[in-house]
Amino acid sequence: MKFFSKKQKLINRLLFGVAILLGILSSLGIRAVVEDIANNEQNKVKIWALTVQQKAQVVAHAQSLLEQMELTERDQVQRWAEALSKMYSSYITPSEFEFYSRIVRENTTIPSIVVDGKNRRILNCLNDDGLCEEVTYFNDILFQDYLQQEPIHVEFMDQNWYIYYKLSEAFYQLQNQLEDLVNSFVVEVVDNSIFAPVLIVTEDERTVVSVGNMSPETYVDSVVLKKTLAEMRAQNAPIEISVGSDTHLVFYKNSIILTRLKYIPIIFVVVLSAFILSLIWTFRISRRSENDKLWVGMSRETAHQLGTPISSLIGWVEYLKSQNVDESHLVEVEKDIERLKVITERFSKIGSEPKMTIQNVVKVVYDSVSYLQVRLSKKIKFQVNVSPDTLILANINSQLVEWVFENLSRNAADAIGMNDGIIQIDISEQAKTVAIDITDNGKGIPKSDWKTIFEAGYTTKSRGWGLGLPLSRRIIHNYHKGEIFVKRSVVGEGTTFRIIFNK
């Protein structure tokens, strides 16, 4: 029967089930929130990547237009130089002169200088803001801005002309704007990376172009950079973009916020489980406290109730002695009365701190055996592995230890039943402990019940309250700070209980 522990076990299991259910539901709820945040961040990254790609295309298109503008201006200078040479030709008609003159006059934006290839004398200047008025010969230092473009060669009669030019102001303004756009584009890629760590590298993945939300330790050298890029590629495929005439790769990974959020469900479950376990522990402590009060109250009430009949029995024994009754008939009665006194004293000690003294464990065991041998079945024999004269000392309360020994011996006798049986008692001594093994050849205990048998209310008997072993455990654990447990048990062969005392 299990009547004291069933309710407690049911409540513990119910609390544990509620904890698991709450943990699962909360974990699923938090996980759903984390997944929503992850999806939202991923969508933002995709939108950002699409914007990056579109801006990169705009930059590439602007670069292409700038290159086309440079070619167009060179063609314009080429036509202007050819028209200028035609104007000085002696074979040109007035109408042709007017035509070429108009072409020359139309060049109002591109600074140009015509230089005699023989002595580098300046023959003509156009759109130079009066610089040529102070200089007769072409000076490389003075006109170094004109050296950035390849000069155009024109043959005029037996002369070689070289037209030096620089691109128009409009071209340089557009170029500066494009450079500003490229620089701001790279910065924007980094700054608008939605908290995600970003690395922009060259196409060969060897050079870092720009960084966002990452520490220098992650790309300090080629080995570390390669490892970092591999980790980022494992999370997300890199985005290929064109910046000017170069191709760059944008690597990114989950933001720190998202990474930390993924651990929230685990942390929540751990905290919730710890909270529920603390509740269960508090509940068990409360139940144990209630049980302690029950034990103390029941024990003291038992001792009180036993006091009256014991006093009465003592009086009856004295009366029988006065009636000249054969004293041999009263010896065993007196022994039982003395035993009842011991039992009453035992119960009275429950709930109070028992007095511990150094006792001979062997003597305590033999005293118990002497009392039990004549009161148990004659088919059961006790065997002790040490002689009565052996001295093995331990710090114990002899009355409480005898109570434990009697409980274990009576349980062993019940397990043996009506069969011939032996209760073997082995006492051994270590440096700091004393061990007592009590072995029977009874029906044994299933391994699944080895711990359950020490719970209050557990019993396999048709009668009994199941309090003997719990009481024995309380005496050994709580009062003696020792141990009691099932050392060995085989169904159909027998059981060995071990008790360990401190010296």
Image (cartoon, helix red, strand yellow):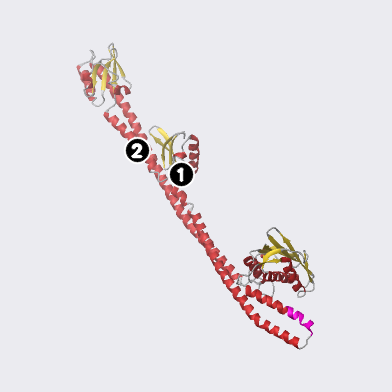
Distance from Cα at disc 1 to Cα at disc 2: 22 Å
Dot 1 amino acid type: Lys
Q: Could you tell me residue 96's position as x and y percent?
A: 22, 18
Q: Which residue is mark 1?
A: 253
Side of 387 relative to 297 (left or right): right
In the rendered structure, the answer to whether residue 112 lies left or right of residue 379 reads left
Q: Amino acid at mark 2?
A: Ser
Q: Residue furthest top?
A: 158
Please indicate, yes or no, whether residue 329 appears anywhere in the rendered image. Answer: yes
- 251 or 348: nearer the viewer: 348
N-terminal label among 1 and 2 = 2
Which of the two residues, 284 or 316, is positioned nearer the viewer here?
316
Q: Residues within 10 Å of mark 1 (few under 14, many from 20)?
A: many
Q: What x and y, as percent, mark residue 167?
A: 29, 26
In the rendered image, which quarter is residue 58 located in?
top left
> Please, is residue 377 above or below residue 89 in the view?
below
List x then y, in percent, for residue 170.
27, 30
**Residue 85 placement, left or right of 260:** left
Main secondary structure type of the part rendered in magenta: helix
What are the residue bounds of the magenta stretch? 326-335
Q: Which quarter of the figure is the C terminus placed in?
A: bottom right
Identity of the residue furthest to the bottom in this view? 323
For the point 76% across and 88% down, the residue is 323
Q: Secondary structure at mark 2?
A: helix
Q: Picture quarter containing residue 214?
A: top left
**Secondary element at image label 1:** loop
482 to 199, vertically: above or below: below
Q: Which mark is residue 184?
A: 2
Residue 180 lies in the magenta stretch: no
